[in-house]
Structures are given as C-alpha cells and as structure tokens.
Amino acid sequence: MNKLHILSNRLPFNANKSGDDFQLTPSVGGLATGMKSIYKKYNGNWIGWPGIAEEDLKGDDRHKIDKALARENCVSVHLTMQDVQLFYEGFSNNTIWPLFHYFNEFVEYDQETWDAYVEVNQKFANAALDVLGEGDTIWVHDYQLLLVPQMIKEKRPDVTIGFFLHIPFPSYEVFRILPWRNELIKGMLGADLLGFHTYDYERHFFSTVRRLLGLEINFNKIHCEDRIILADAFPMGIDYDKFMNASINVKHKLLQEKSELQLELEKYFLISPNRKLILSIDRLDYTKGIPNRLKAFSIFLEKYPEYQGRVSLVMLAVPSRGNVDQYKKLKEQVDGLVGYINGKFGKVNYTPIWYFYRSMPFENLIELYNASDVALITPVRDGMNLVAKEYVASRVNKTGVVILSEMAGVSKEMGEAININPNNFNEIADSIHQALEMPIDEQRSRMSTMQERIKRYDVFKWAAEFVKSLEKVEGIQQQFNTKKITSSIQKLIVGDYSDTKKRAIFLDYDGTLSGFKANPQDAFPDDEVLDIVKKLTADDKNEVTIISGRDRETLEKWFKGYDVNLIVEHGVWTRVRGGKWKMLQQINADWKENIRPALESFVDRTPGAFIEEKNYSLVWHYRKAEPEQGVLRANELKDELTNLIANHNLEIMEGNKVIEVKSGGINKGAAAMRFLGNKDFEFILAIGDDWTDEYMFRELPEMAVTVKVGMVNTAAKFKVESVEAVRKLLKSLAEKR
Ligand code: GDG
C-alpha cells in the first residue's frame, strides 16, 4: 500500500487562537486515538475541519492554521458558518442522525440542508483529491460524509477507498423514507470496503442495496457494475492499555496528587463502606436513553427501599448540539427528572443523583470508572458505545457490573453484561438490584472474560483489521478484473477480427445486447442494437447468430428483415438466415403438466413472480418480486424442482432472476457447436451474461473469443461490465471490414 489518508468531519486537533498564532489541542475520543496510530504509520494525511469557521479567520489566519496543521500531517477543509449550520447541524444531525437511530419523528426533510450536504461533501472530496497520490488509499469516516466515496471514485478510480460508519445503519424500512436515499446509497458505494460496527448494520445495508439498486450480493461481496465492493463488520475497540494504566495510576496516587473529585468519591465511601455508586456517561443525546435510565432508577429506589441512602447514580452528561430544539427539550426533561428524584428520595446527607452537565478531563473520567460499582448504559440506539468498553478496561481488580442496553452495538460483544431492553423500566430497576447483589466471584468471572476480549480486539487491532481488509479488497478486485477487456485487449480482438475472412459471432440477447426490463416483452431491440446487427451482418465474412433462451415468435418478430441466424429456447430451434425453423433434436414437452403446478404454487406465494411458457421449457420469473423474498423462494423452488425432476430427462437452469425447467440435453453450447459443424471458421466470438451462456463458453473451440457480461466468475476468457460495454465492443468490430 502507498499512503493511507484519513478523512473525517473533524480533525484530531482543535485549532485555537493563541496570541498571534494558532495552537493545536489534540481531540480525545476513540476515533482520534485509533487513527493516529494508523495514518502516521502509513505516511498519510488526515483531512478534516479544524473547528473554526472561515468568518473567524482574519488576515493570514488561514495560512497560519494550515501551517500548524501541516506539521501534524493534517490538511484542513475550511467551512463557513453557513456550511456548518446547514451541512453539519442541518442535514447530518437533523436528518441522518435521527433517522439512522430510528427517531423518525425528529427527522427534518429540508432541500436547503440537503443541497448544503452535497456541496460540503464535495468540498471534503476536493480537499482529498488535492492530496491523493497515485495508488493511494483513503479511509473516510462517518455519516457526515456519505457522498464522498463516490465523489472521489468518479475522479480517481485508481484510489482504494474505505468507509466506516460509526452509527447504526437502519433497516431498509426506515432508510427508504429518505427522499435522497438513492443518492446516499450510491455515494457510499463509491467505496471499495464498507465497515460497520455490527453484522446487523451490515445486513440492513445489504438489504437496502439489493432492494434499492437491485445489485447482486454474494456473501459479503457486492457486485456493482464494474467493481466488487466488500462490506464487513469491524466492532470498534478502545485503547485498552491507556485506560488500564491510567486506572492503576489513580490507585497509586499520593494524597496531595489526588483530584477534588477523587477526594469526594473517597469521602462518599468513607461514610459507610456499604455504599455503592452507579455510573453513567454520555453526550446529552436523545439516543442515549437518559430519561429512561432516570425513571428506572426512581423505580429501583421505590421498589428496593433498603438501597435508599446507600446507592447514588453519578450521571455525567456532556453538552452536545445545544442549539438544536430536540436537545434543548431533552435537557429540560433531564433537569426536571433529576430534580424530581433528588427531591423525592434525597436526605441531608444523601443525594440520589450526582448530575454533572459538562465534560470532564480524562483523569476524572478514570476516577469515576474506578470508583463505580455498576455502569448503567441504557441507549435506545447506539452504533457501538465506547463508554461500556472503557469502564471494563478501567476495572483493575476485575470487580464491577455492566448493565447494558441490547440496542447498543457493543452488546453483541458483551454477553457477560446484564443485558436489558432500555424501554423496560422495571427490568432495568431489577437489573440494578441484581448488579448490586452480584457476588464478587461472579463479578470477577464476568469481568475477566470481557476484559480479555476488549484487550485483544482494541482500537489498534480494529484499525489494523480494517486496513488489512482494504488490502484484501484490492486483491479481490484485481482477480475479478484480470479478464476485463481493456482498451489494449479490445485492440487485439479487433485486430484478429479484421485479419480473418470467415467469422462466427454468437450473441446472447437479454443482459447482453439489451438490458433487463421488468416485463420481458418490453426488452425489444432499440435502434442502437438494430444498427449494430445491421452493420455486422452487412459484412459477408460474418455469420451472426442471436442465441437466446427466448421463444421463436418473439425473436422472429424482433429481427424480421435482418440477416441473422436465430438459435432459440437454448438451442431447441434453429433458423438460418430467414430460412425455415428446424428442431435440432426430437424432444417432447409432456412433462410440463407435472411441473407447472409446482411453479404456480410459487407464483401464488411470491407477489410479482410469474410463469413464462415456452415450447420446451417453463420459466419462473422473479425480477418483479421483492428481491429478498425472490431469492429465498428461488432457492426453495430449486430444491422442490430437484426432487420433482429426479428420473426425468429434465434440467433446471438458473438464469438472471429466473429459474427455468427444460428438456435435458439441450443447451447453448451443444447448439452452437452443431451450428459450427465442420465449417472452418477463423474467428469465433461468443458473448453472454448468464449461466446458460457458460455452456457456450465451455464447449466452443479453444480459439474462440468468449466474453462474459458481468464481473463474476466465469468460464469465458474475458469479461465486460455492462450491456453498454458489449455494444461498444461490437461497434468497434462493425466499423472494420
Ligand atoms: C459515536 C457513536 C460509537 C465522554 N464524556 C467525556 C469523554 N467522553 C468520551 C468517552 C468516549 C466518547 O467520549 C463517547 O463515545 P461513545 O461511543 O460512547 O458515543 P458517541 O460520542 O455517541 O460516538 C457511538 C462511537 O461513535 C465510535 O464509533 O461507539 O455509538 O454514537 O470515548 O470516554 N471524554 C472526556 N471527558 C468527558 O467528559 N475526556
């Protein structure tokens, strides 16, 4: 790998004016820590916004910031206040954030913020394009920059692009609500590797890609026109050693070194060693389930009164997005609940909730992790939740219990926590009781298992695994591209063609000469196809054959007056240049009556599916069915048909969104070979897109130029990515005489 660059909304430093110059203060948080280790190692740049709006930059401030950042290998994207307001606070935080966290009622649909999102994504993409060298790799982060991968890919297809989403990817039913859903999903698909925290987000993404764009997905590979795109789950980790070591330090501090918070915490336990502390830390965000937590804590105190006076909840709520209405309302609600609970259960020497509405230095955070017996983490939706991992990493003596919402991505990795539904207040109240009563041995056993796991898959491992997959995807793409017809290969093919005088050209129709339509009858040849066929057939050195699974009537009608040979129904019938139809071998179709009921029952159960009847085959089409159900039913149908056709001379063929049952022994390979007979062709070209064409690719003589449409595994010698590419190739042949 050449250089690896990082692109995120914010840089890992905040630029602050200090006198005449700018000082950089490192930003904390998982992303900054994990990425720092990576981008320096690979010699790359970190591109992002330094946190100061352009309007606040006077004179040559911009130059000064850029210079200071350049010393840290950072490159700034300068944003105006309006950019920040419309792109960040607007579309990112008022549209994508609530929607992806299933808060549909908070989602704003605003054309102006969308326009700004597109414009600012382009600013980020341009900044990246200025930096990217030949063969470099870039890792783009998070929901603010969903369009950037495509914007970069369009200009620089040689660059490998990774994208990681730090928040959940919602179910298709939620994602589809967005008016700009296609743009966003296509933006993401500019990447070569897409990473999510959990498999659930990954599968929601796959189902969205399948349903919105109809792309094929094989295991975790998306077949996108000319590229393979990989998606995978990479659960983000933390800098485990940093938390553990900081925590050990807290324990060894001398009295005079201790912080005010630490002294207060020690005093709390000094009054009675029986006292317990429960901790929660989050940004004050409606996704974090803070009101639910408070209500559940209140129920707990009510239900288990013996704990009143000896259990307090320390709640650190970090101010966040304070200008947004929803956040203001949440703040009021939380303030109210805290006041209510403290008023109801508080005593002169007992405060049920210690509420901090601010951020704290890292040292204080560690002290809180250290002193608390229970971590109460109750988000209603959370991409991962690093606080849960940080609490575990800070538990030096391996005691402590985590109560964890099953709606947080991290719950997938923490089976040893007490998992709760954040909307079930009674369950949370009981789980607080269970946590407080948990025997020390059990706490240690659960905690050590979680520690081992979180230590092993830390943030460095996470980043390294992602980068490893980025390297792997390059290999996979190269493998799929090895057979791709490049312009130099095309030149060779055209050269061979023009050097020869007796040529056979076999062209499949659907998916090869013409794209698919929901209704097969609508896929008639357009002017471009007819023109290509006309030009190719005008050359008397050519024998052009349309070789298709379609029926006689359709192709005869579509190519009436054209000097082509037709092989139809996969080779049952042949018609040489306007002559009479001939059946290549005697076959019967009596079997249809036995097979049709099975297909009909699958039509009844699969909305959108239908049966096409040909003379010697029955075809079950599912292109118009809901994609996932279609695939599911197709598999079931294949299974059922396999049993039904046993002991009959029948074959099941799987085409593009079709399952076809036909009389055995007939296929395009045999038909093409029979057509060639012992005529000495000097040049043979065969192009096709699906399974049925593979017979041709395998059986034609070694010298044949066989071409698969689609970047998938094939027996053909070459591949092209699309119908357009087929037409381009054929046009370049037609021009030669
Ligand atoms: C997003 C996703 C996903 C908090 N208060 C203070 C402070 N923090 C630090 C914590 C932790 C980080 O902030 C919060 O991370 P989370 O993961 O809990 O949540 P989000 O900010 O919502 O992050 C989330 C994450 O991205 C990573 O992909 O896990 O699901 O929403 O590191 O320690 N740090 C300091 N003082 C504080 O007062 N110093």
Image (cartoon, rainbow, N blue to C red):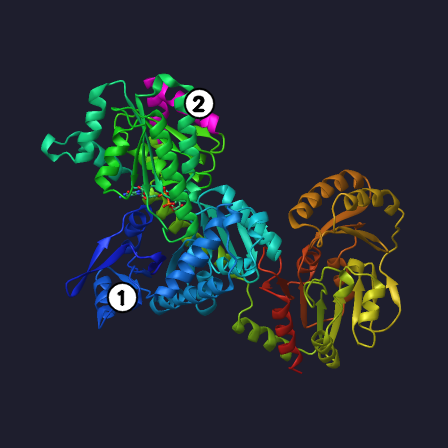
Q: Main secondary structure of the magenta part?
A: helix
Relative placement, left or right, of 199 versus 448 is: right
Q: Is residue 338 left or right of residue 553?
A: left
Residue 410 quadrant = top left
Q: In this figure, which residue is indicated by the disc labeled 2?
A: 430
Can the viewer see residue 436 in this picture? Answer: yes
Any magenta on residue 436? yes
- Amino acid type, mark 1: Asp
Q: Quadrant of residue 58?
A: bottom left
Q: Which residues are magenta?
A: 425-450
Q: Is residue 442 visible?
A: no
Find residue 361 and name its label. Answer: none
Q: Which image quarter: residue 696?
A: bottom right
The yes-or-no answer for disc 1 within 8 Å of ligand 1 is: no
Circle 1 Cα neighbour tier, 10 Å, few/some/many (<14 / 14–19 / ≥20): few
Q: Is residue 446 magenta?
A: yes
- Residue for badge 1: 56
- Whether label 2 lies within 8 Å of ligand 1 gets the answer no
Quarter occupied by the C terminus = bottom right
Query: x, y (%) of residue 151?
Result: 46, 65
Does residue 271 sit above or below 513 in this rendering?
above
Residue under the point 53% across and 48% down: 104
